[in-house]
Amino acid sequence: MPEIKFYDHEPIPMEMHKVKIVQQLNLLPTRQRLERIKEAGFNTFQLHNGDIFMDMLTDSGVNAMSDEQLAGMMKPDDAYAGSESFFRMAKKLEEIFGIPYCLPAHQGRACENILATRFVTSGKCVIMNYHFTTTKAHITRLGGHVEELVKDEGLVSKSDLPFKGDIDLDKLEACIQKEGADNVAFMRIEAGTNLIGGQPVSVQNFKDACAIARKHGVLSVLDASLLQDNLYFNKTRDEACKDMSIREITREIADQFDIIYFSARKFGFARGGAILVRDEALYHSMEDLVPMFEGFLTYGGMSIREIEAMTVGFDESMEMDVISQGPQFIKYCVDQLDAYGVPMITPGGGLGAHVDAIQMVGHIPQEEYPSGALTAAFYICGGIRGMERGTLSEERNPDGSERLASMELVRLALPRRVFTLSQVEYVIDRVKWVYDHRELIGGLRFVHEPATLRFFTGKLEPTSDWPEKLAEAFIADFGEDQ
């Protein structure tokens, strides 16, 4: 990756691509946005995309594909069984990861369903550095439980630690001893911890954690959905990796694990997923679950066109010029907001910029979903759709009480190769305004609360007329049409 230097300008991230196709955006006036968020039950998942100006909900399935990926989609083998497109993909994955067996699935949570169905039974434990919402839901629905063992420092918002996603090795050893190795379904390490700010894991931590699991006969599983960001941070933050290529770092990590799975809606810039299995007998023990839940073994519920795009995307994910753009844009956004005083998760990780809602709107009790309220405020004051990553994303305890999240975050995702730097500057400006008017924001309460994954389809209402007051203050500063 070349370092772009400027003669008379402060350093800024540079896109290593050019735009060939564009999509028109729409910025509704403030009062219309207020009505839309009310209709959506103050849940940004329920907004219509046509009502959104900057869609920063996720980077899942919304990354821009390259011209080579689009070209690849024109040469699929559409066979139901035995598709050559699948074999090309499986060969590419074996080349990159060194793992011979591939089970396709339509996305990451489908992989999680297969793994949980195969390994989790009532009372079983799954050890993780940190959970992801759907991963945990698949485990708990089968009667299992999750133990989260991320280092304590990983839950500190403001920090300069380079690898805040590392699992605590002492806690890992103690947890296996306490649970008993036979009761641990598997150890799952997420390469880039989604719910605590996309924070990466060091190569040495991968090695040490897998060595402990191997010593006790516990299966090691890597969730590689966010691997491309993690690889960028391994390359740029870890002295041991600075002289290694991205492919070499990838193999160094992959060689530690028994199973690797991923969502290609993130890793590979397409829309699909797969489980990679090192052991043949283990592979055969899961293969019947793919046709049961997904589709045949050579398409796994995916469009063959997507499989061809994924195969190109895997190669591109091994290029520093490709994987650097997201983390660099995120760092720029985080650093600008942090300098202004907005409480951000630092250092900037993968996925997006993460605002610490506990620090920004600490006057809102966690039981009134401060992250959800702040997410709604960003939409009202800018047409920006972020994602709540806090208590609203948790599920209630068995007694009906709230399970308060360890962190209350608003994620402003930066899909790869989608936004320009001027659009990022717009987001920075609007977040600054909301920060300066944060005392106007109040809480939320549920009016429709699904039992599982409530953050997807639940609907809420404000605990007061704070959305109207916030909108009027914004209009007073920016006028009617902004």
Image (cartoon, rainbow, N blue to C red):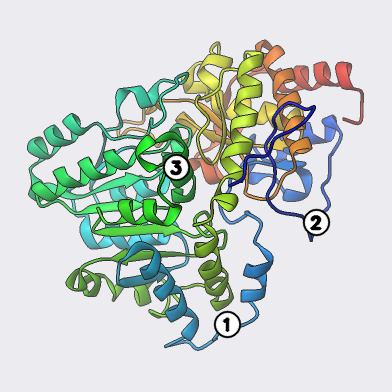
**N-terminal label among 3 and 1:** 1
Q: Amino acid at mark 1?
A: Pro
> Could you tell whether 317 is left or right of 234 in the image?
right
Q: Would residue 364 be visible to someone looking at this image?
A: no
Position of residue 419 measured from the top left corner of the image (x, y, whole percent): 72, 45
Discs 2/3, front: 3
Above or below 347: residue 38: below
Whether tag 3 and tag 1 are in contact, CB under 8 A, the answer is: no
Which of label 3 and label 1 is nearer to you?
A: 3
Between discs 2 and 3, the one toward the N terminus:
2
Callout 1 secondary element = loop
Q: Earlier in the sequence, mark 2 or mark 1?
A: 2
- Inter-mark Cα distance, 2 to 1: 25 Å
Place of residue 158 in the rendered image (x, y in percent of width and height, measured from the top left): 47, 18
Q: Residue 16's x, y, as percent?
A: 68, 50
According to the image, label 2 marks what residue? 22
